[in-house]
Image (cartoon, coloured by chain):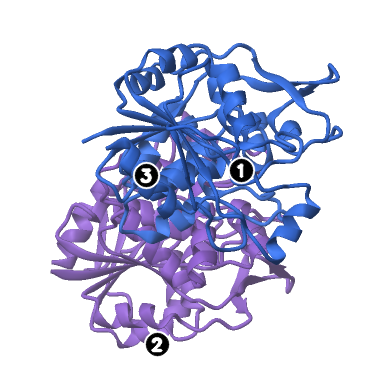
Chain colours: A blue, B purple
Amino acid sequence: MKKVVVIGGGTGVFTVLTGLKDYPFELCAIVSMADDGGSTGLLREEFGTLPAGDIRRALIALSDSNKKVLSELFNFRFGEETSLKGHSMGNLLLTALEKITGDFGSAIAEAGDVLNIKGEVIPVTLTRTKLFATLSNGKVVEGETNIDIPKHDGTISIKNIFLKPNAKANPKALEAIKKADAIILGPGDVYTSILPNLVVEGIVSALKNTKAKIIYNVNIMTKFGETNGFLASDFVEKMEEYLGKNIIDCVTVNTEKPTGEIVKRYEKENVEFVKNDLKDSNIIAADFLREGMFLRHDPEKLAKVLSKIIE
Amino acid sequence: MKKVVVIGGGTGVFTVLTGLKDYPFELCAIVSMADDGGSTGLLREEFGTLPAGDIRRALIALSDSNKKVLSELFNFRFGEETSLKGHSMGNLLLTALEKITGDFGSAIAEAGDVLNIKGEVIPVTLTRTKLFATLSNGKVVEGETNIDIPKHDGTISIKNIFLKPNAKANPKALEAIKKADAIILGPGDVYTSILPNLVVEGIVSALKNTKAKIIYNVNIMTKFGETNGFLASDFVEKMEEYLGKNIIDCVTVNTEKPTGEIVKRYEKENVEFVKNDLKDSNIIAADFLREGMFLRHDPEKLAKVLSKIIE
């Protein structure tokens, strides 16, 4: 069975895992540990635990439990206006499990056991660290949330990102990359979901040395404050800035342009359709657009193409 | 297999269930719904859910899961000083499950399923209600916590308790009482754990009409503000005040007087050893005392005696 490693954070990892779960692959998710917003941020600050949000989403995506209520429970969120301040149940469970077992790795294993997950979820690092971004005007922004939801002028571009303190790769993540047959990066927010994994010490060199086929999925839409005006080639270039040239073996790009009301809603938030300007033998351009309220990748369409690349 | 129903609340139900779990009985716990203190009280107030605390304890007692971490998780409590204000994870889980499934009964069933419980846990009522106590001086105290931890002069005795609004018995509780071979009341706080079940409309008449043997376990110690100066016979009389005469078939009383430092600690809290003044063929006087920090029933000693009465 082919070993497939998905690297990222946020909803992107969820999309890829959800789609690939139905294929005969051994799945593993390596998940960013830079999240410091919302429920995750509150728990980090108060309990000193590692960020649970992205881990929670990956666990739910891989859950193969016949008890559907368990994933509902993991996703359940107490109201923002209540004293439980919008905490998600899954985050609280992971926090409690970290306190009970004494470490985050065991907490994830226990949660994975309860959810009967098909595959493995690995935090990219176990170092308690914070994400910073240097803007093109020289200013430094502290914290993933402040980059994700820019308090600064979002038209100013990001020069680079870094972690402070320096984070060392989780040995399990390095092992998974080494043993993988395919590694999937993206879709996902470039500076707040994908790159926070690549700036962890050891990850890029592992990616350079693995025999695995490395696939990058370009986002469907740009993100204000991160990738304003990006074309498909800009996304790939940004990855290569961190990975080095000739590391990515294959790139997928969406070609289906969304239409209608939904586009106007996105335009209001300064979010644009990513045009494909890539033309090469290793570029797979196809319709990946999901129907619905969000302009995101369709898990099934994406998985169908990815599975063919992997095999 | 003999059907055994345990009626109560708090740690008493936990003790009896824990002990009886190792015997070949079909166990069912009918649990008081009057709790309004601590984590349970906060969640009741804010989310309008039914009180989870006593249900949680009964679920843990009956858990037969090979995943020990699950019952640890259910019992895990976030610090009082944190923004999660001493909430227990089990209470949060039951609250979330009530919101997800839409009713408390289903929430308990789902939690029981996850914990792989051996038996059934039934809330005595599904009516959202509150416990009141009339004191001997005519004053009325509102709320279970204010009775449990008296803000009034604890030497003033309680005349009676009642629920407002009137609570109707859960049909499942009535069914369990009807079908039972044995019903166990106590140990437990008289006014805040045992009697809150008996003042639910329909429970006493079900107890009067069942063919089951009814057993009452007298507490080991008195409780300040509830049973000051009570002898064993006072406990039985108090039960009969609500149940009627000749309903209790058998009474167990502890005979082992605790000694040492622990007694002094209890004396400081105006808690005394309950002397046995009962002498009848249906009275079983034995050593039920548990070793340890609390003067409580030993689950194994109690279960050994109870199992012989039941068979």
Report in which chain the residue with disc 1 lies. Answer: B
The residue pinned by badge 2 equals B205
Q: In which quarter of the image is the C terminus of chain B?
A: bottom left
The residue pinned by badge 3 equals B70
Most foreground residue, B182 or B262: B182
| Residue A246 circle label | none
| Labels 3 and 1: the sequence-earlier one | 3
**Looking at numbered disc 1 in the image, what kind of residue is underneath it?**
Gly
Q: Residues within 10 Å of mark 1 (few under 14, many from 20)?
A: some
**Looking at numbered disc 2 in the image, what kind of residue is underneath it?**
Ser
Q: Which residue is drawn at 66% across and 35% down?
A: A41
Most foreground residue, A145 or A177: A177
Q: How crowded is mark 2: few (under 14 residues within 10 Å), some or many (20 or more)?
A: few
Q: Which residue is drawn at 56% across and 14% down?
A: A167
Q: Residue at x 45, y 19 (%)?
A: A247
Residue A262: where, in percent of width, then height?
69, 62
